[in-house]
Amino acid sequence: MEFEAELKAKVAEIEEIIAKYLPKEEGYARTVIEAMNYSIQAGGKRIRPMLMKEVYTLFGGSGSEVEYFMVALEMIHTYSLIHDDLPCMDNDEYRRGRKTTHIVYGEGIATLAGDGLLNLACEIASDAFDTDADPVKVGKAIKYLFGKSGIYGMIGGQTADIEAEDMDQRFVDDARLLYIHENKTGALIQAAMVIGGILGGANEITQRTLSKIARNVGVAFQIQDDILDVTSTFEELGKPIGSDLKNQKTTYVTLHGLEASAKEVERLSNEAITLLHTIPYDNPFLEELLKSLISRKK
Amino acid sequence: MEFEAELKAKVAEIEEIIAKYLPKEEGYARTVIEAMNYSIQAGGKRIRPMLMKEVYTLFGGSGSEVEYFMVALEMIHTYSLIHDDLPCMDNDEYRRGRKTTHIVYGEGIATLAGDGLLNLACEIASDAFDTDADPVKVGKAIKYLFGKSGIYGMIGGQTADIEAEDMDQRFVDDARLLYIHENKTGALIQAAMVIGGILGGANEITQRTLSKIARNVGVAFQIQDDILDVTSTFEELGKPIGSDLKNQKTTYVTLHGLEASAKEVERLSNEAITLLHTIPYDNPFLEELLKSLISRKK
């Protein structure tokens, strides 16, 4: 219960930081700005900025530059959800219990709202150069962020994912699924943890350890997502369940069954925690957070 | 005819620069990369990178950092066309005589290709920090680029534009049209000329002059676009004509007629050229280029 209270307080902190960077809803562009703010304020779990901050402070980081990257990363995550929910992609009408952006604002504005958030993320990340932080670290963090969110990261994963949906499902194998999980979900978790390390002062070897931990967490997170799609309810998830089955989508669960999927989540989780213990700093909250992400029920 | 030959040579130079930065079509993300390259190699006029380079050299710039911005800007322009052509936006099947990206690759991949180009533009612009160029100028150029391409620039203009299409056309007035033209079209022309000035070493007063010239060119360019939609042919434009009338879209031409529109284009053009002459450097090619943009027949 103590963890839950700490988690709640930290989410509230992050909400305050994000609120400072939201654009004002005014002028001729008002509608697209409203759609951007509607989407980013939809009450996500703020996992990515939270992981970034925790890793940053773990290595002694205490500046303001991390805030710019926390907000930029959450904006990138949010834009990807908006575009992913569009009828031409996953065609989802609900997310986190609320109607998705294109249902409320229409597809055109939703497309532009996603574009607007990605563009703003680039502006905000670049603003970190105006802080007292080491510009070499800021430059490295920007490269890492947009590397992981681009065609060799998240967008690559989304491409393989929507192509997999149109394929003969017999050709959707473990290798493709792993690529999708590592990139569609893992890449931004890696951005969170590794950028926290870069800015906080972790050395390169430790940055690689952080990258591996995040990769495991990302893949486990996605398999857990597929498990919940079978075992959860609309009320718990805030979105329709059983959609993978309905769409005849190949997932780790359809390939290996629920039991083996749960075991794989546990294996990935144990490996991540073992790796975390190789880092010579203690952060019990971060450990709890990683565990809670993997074994989450919603 | 000399101008045409020089123009052709300069376009070829820019094509070579762009080609260096195109991602390789391989791996699981191959399809989205193909779609990105298909779109950016669709044979545009390369006006924006050309203007940037001309202004850059006008002020004595001779480094390689301008290339990163030329390519980033062309990628931003290209992504905006891909998303703008989508069925949920302008729903265009042809551009420059070729099928649009979503017609060839489907809407999902087209959406991701646009995202991928914007993301890559951010990466490439940030790479300019790795050159010998003054990092203060590079930082300023990045801010200007993403300011002009975001919600207070191009995306704002596109928002007002698609909203205007759904409005009672009696409420689409000169003020809204001017906002749309200044932002949807003018903003990236401003990015081209002002970033050329920033990187090349123009002072702040001159940067403002460049901004005004570019704004006039952008607005004139858009009014000329609306004129051509009435007076040109499919063969000349490479896309269907008469679409504004068919879509009952309010334009400068529907508000004021062809004659007054042509006069406004001339007025804006003359003002731009007068402003250009206040800059104490001669570049006859740049002057010809600006004139040709405004009075273009396709």
Image: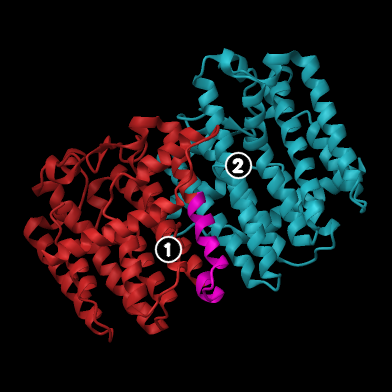
Chain colours: A cyan, B red
The vertical placement of A63 against A190, above or below, is below
Query: Can you tell which quarter of the image residue A126 is in?
Result: bottom right
For the point 54% across and 42% down, which residue is it? Answer: A151
Q: Is residue A11 visible?
A: no
Q: Say whether residue A265 is magenta.
A: no
Mark 1 = which residue?
B67
Give, as a single range, the part of the protein colored magenta. Answer: B119-139
Identity, as a three-letter code, of the amino acid under mark 2? Gly
Mark 2 = which residue?
A153
Q: Main secondary structure of the magenta part?
A: helix
- The quarter of the image holding the N terminus of chain B is bottom left
x, y percentage for residue B241?
Answer: 15, 42
Mark 1: few/some/many CA within 10 Å (<14, 14-19, 20+): many
x, y percentage for residue B61?
Answer: 40, 76
Q: Between A27 and B126, which is closer to the camera in this rendering?
A: B126
Looking at the rendered image, the disc whose residue lies closer to the viewer, 1 or 2, is: 1
Task: Give the side of residue B134 with respect to residue B50, left or right.
Answer: right
x, y percentage for residue A74?
Answer: 64, 49
Name, please, the residue furthest toward the left. Answer: B259
Q: Between B284 and A161, which is closer to the camera in this rendering?
A: B284
Task: Name the element at disc 1.
Answer: helix
